[in-house]
Image: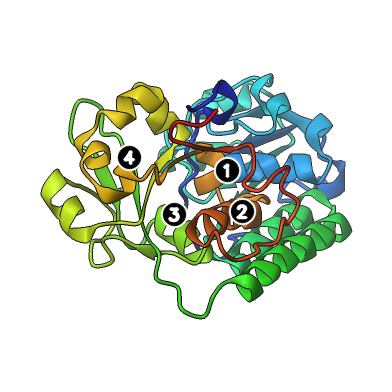
Amino acid sequence: MISRRQALVGVGATVSALSLSTSPVLSSGISAGRATKIVSVGGAITETLFALKLGDRIRAVDTTSTYPDAANALPKVGYLRELSAEGVLAMQPDLVLLSAEAGPPAAIAQLKAAGIPVQQIAIGRTPDGVRSMVEAIGQATGTQNSAAELAAQIGAGFDSLAAALPAEQTTRALLLLSAGAGPLLGAGANTAAASIIALGGGQLAFPEMDGYKAVSLEPVLAADPDWLLFPSHVAMALGGADGIAALDVVSKTRAGQAGRVAFVDSHYLLGFGPRAPQAAADLATLFYPDITIPTIGRDAVPSSLLGLMGKQ
């Protein structure tokens, strides 16, 4: 049974690209290391700032910033793709760190026109992408040394996991999202779900499908995935474990009947913050129970951020 602790809200599915700015001296002339009123927009960025021990320098965050718990107590400036420039400016920041997918463009342009130091940071879906994100944030905040250490730890985690995975990776997983009153959406290629499943040594149940698409029972039965994955915010929207157990794609599939249904904290699984190696290791632990998967800093194996159907 999914627990409240496993049901934190917030999907951080993001895009991979180069950081748009890496200069340690910001456009307003403020030294990066002196910024003490940061507005952080993007769950992975906020998580990284806290990992770099910069939580006391954050003035406000967006609604996707749900980790760590201290982030939830901070003022909110809205959803990262629907920002209000006025709301951000009201926080009187001396640095705004934005996920590269933040918007709308008019709000970003307004922030830059106001003379506020703005740094747009790409959130990568690969080990190199996650490391680059951390290093870019370190550059923007004048914490390059700490960021280099954190990036190295993240890289070592990914490397140790990759070394433990079997040469033949045949486990197929289907991650499902809720579309409100509409059909369930299955994860295809070019999604955050595809990236984290691959890092955990799995394959997509629908590898030829691009993006998130509506799925019905028949194609799911034909694909016959080994595991069904539900981000925690989706599990809550569908009525928790009981609601999910009643879904046809669960009750009538071999994976569902065998209890191979997992609920994973949404931001942890799809956010690609500093905990991405642990999230991938949690999936690998499910996919390959006969192989010893490294702990990589998890609090348990699998971690407490992952729950299984029918288990507390």
98, above or below 283, in the image: above
Instruction: Reply above or below: 115 against 61.
Output: below
Identify residue type, mark 2.
Answer: Ala
Question: Mark 3: which amino acid?
Answer: Ala
Q: Position of residue 102 (x, y in %)?
A: 48, 43
Q: Provide the residue designation for mark 4.
A: 177
Precedes in sequence: disc 3 or disc 4: 4
| Inter-mark Cα distance, 4 to 1 | 15 Å
Quarter of the image containing the C terminus? top right
- Per the image, label 1 sits on a secondary structure element best described as helix
The residue identified by callout 1 is 268
Could you tell me which secondary element the residue under label 4 belongs to?
Answer: strand
Out of 8 and 244, give the one closest to the viewer.
244
Secondary structure at numbered mark 3:
helix
Query: Do labels 1 and 3 touch, CB within 8 Å?
Result: no
Please name the residue shown 55% across and 65% down the image. 126
Is there a contact, CB below 8 Å, between mark 2 and mark 3? Answer: no
Q: Relative to the observer, which residue lies in front, 88 or 276?
A: 276
Q: Where does label 2 land, which residue?
A: 276
The image quarter in which residue 293 lies: bottom right
Distance (Cα) linking label 2 and label 3:
11 Å
* Residue that numbered label 3 is attached to: 192
Q: Residue 86's mark?
A: none
Image height of 161 relative to 218, above or below = below
* Residue 108, x across and y down, in percent: 50, 41
